[in-house]
Image (cartoon, rainbow, N blue to C red):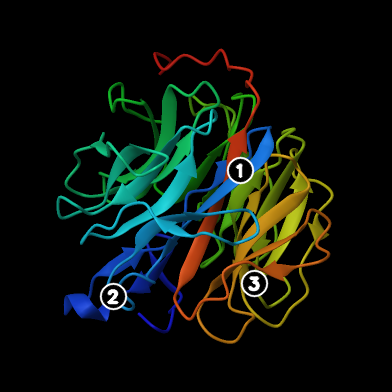
Amino acid sequence: MRTRMKIIVGGARCMLAPVLGLAVAVLVAAPARAAFPGADGAIAFDSDRAAPGVQLDIFKMRPNGGDAVNLTASPAQDQQPNWSPDGRRIAFAGDRDGDFEIFVMNTDGSDPRQVTFNGTGDFDPSWCPDGRHLAFVAVRDGNAEVYTMREDGSMQRNRTRNAADDLEPAWSPRGSRIAFQSDRMPHAGDVELYGMAPDGSDAVRLTAAQGFDGEPSWSPSGALIAFDSERSGNAEIYRIRADGRGATRLTHHAGVDIRPAWSPSSERIAFSSDRAGGEFEIFRMRADGSRSVNLTGSPAFDFSADWQPLGQRHEQGTWSDDAE
């Protein structure tokens, strides 16, 4: 696992784990997400620094990269952290029962609760701004679909119902839309961003560039979506307006820049990059792409940042999970 291999498993970027002795892919694509408005709190991320090349745990650190703490310290693979809108809980994916399921824990890592029990894998958790629902991805019918559920795992609903692989759901800050990535375009290897209502209706394609456009992150206002794209021939961070227009490139580096995560203050974007020349690290830049800083600076694999919102209440959407 010291060298990250970009492969495709059901449309997701993955990392092989040779330590398992099997051709098993360990998911390392974090959930796409919204940045809920507030002050910039801790940054959660997944890392193999506790057991290099063996397992991923979920860590959190200060916004400047200091005081990293292991929150899970489990022999399982725990990854894809996603902060709740009130900043008091973290949803994540873990394979503690032999396949990936969704868990929810407190911000200090205590009281981890498994909320899905599906033998074929659940991952990519993304909180609804009401703090009572989650979107996630499940592989239950031979392909990846976006589902929604209540926080306790009840009322699970398939919202995409498409033969393609639909991944990386990100609930908008007001709860009215879910952005996601899909390979439903007819061109081989083409992955684009889409948006839909939380009940799965009104699906609209947001990008139309040949290649990979994915891993969306909403700005706190809901006006912009950051994402990564290979349209330039290299993986870079871009942003678009919520309607898909006005694409702006934010990073210009020979390294691989992926997994953007907007800060709750809207002033910064965290992202994952191998530009330091070794393993992936967590970087931070201004929202316009300037002044990038390496926050982790570790020989370990540090990946998939998500930012804790602090100090504000959030508007709760009126979406109902009873909608079919």
Q: Quarter of the image holding residue 161?
A: top left
Kindly report which numbered mark, 3 or 2, lies closer to the viewer in this rendering: 2
Q: Secondary structure at mark 3?
A: loop
Q: Amino acid at mark 2?
A: Ala
Task: Using residue 227 as the reference point, say whether residue 99 is left or right of it.
Answer: left
Q: Amino acid at mark 1?
A: Gly
Q: Is residue 82 above or below residue 221?
A: below
Q: CA distance from mark 3 to mark 2?
A: 23 Å
| Front position in the image: 40 or 146 | 40
Mark 3 vs 2, N-terminal side: 2
Mark 2 vs 1, N-terminal side: 2
Task: Using residue 109 as the reference point, say whether residue 6 is left or right of it.
Answer: right
Q: Amino acid at mark 3?
A: Ala
Q: At x 28% / y 23%, what residue is drawn?
A: 154
Q: Is residue 308 above or below residue 231?
A: above
> Which label belongs to residue 127?
none
Q: Quarter of the image holding residue 276?
A: bottom right
Q: Are marks 3 and 2 in contact (CB under 8 Å)?
A: no
Q: Residues within 10 Å of mark 1 (few under 14, many from 20)?
A: some
| Front position in the image: 32 or 268 | 268
| Residue 273 image point, x, y percent | 60, 72
Q: Which residue is mark 2?
A: 17
Residue found at the very far front of the displayed protein? 67
Q: Which residue is mark 1?
A: 41
> Which label belongs to residue 235?
3
Task: Using residue 307 as the reference point, say whether residue 224 is left or right of it.
Answer: right
Q: Quarter of the image holding residue 272?
A: bottom right
Q: At x 57% / y 27%, what residue is drawn?
A: 197
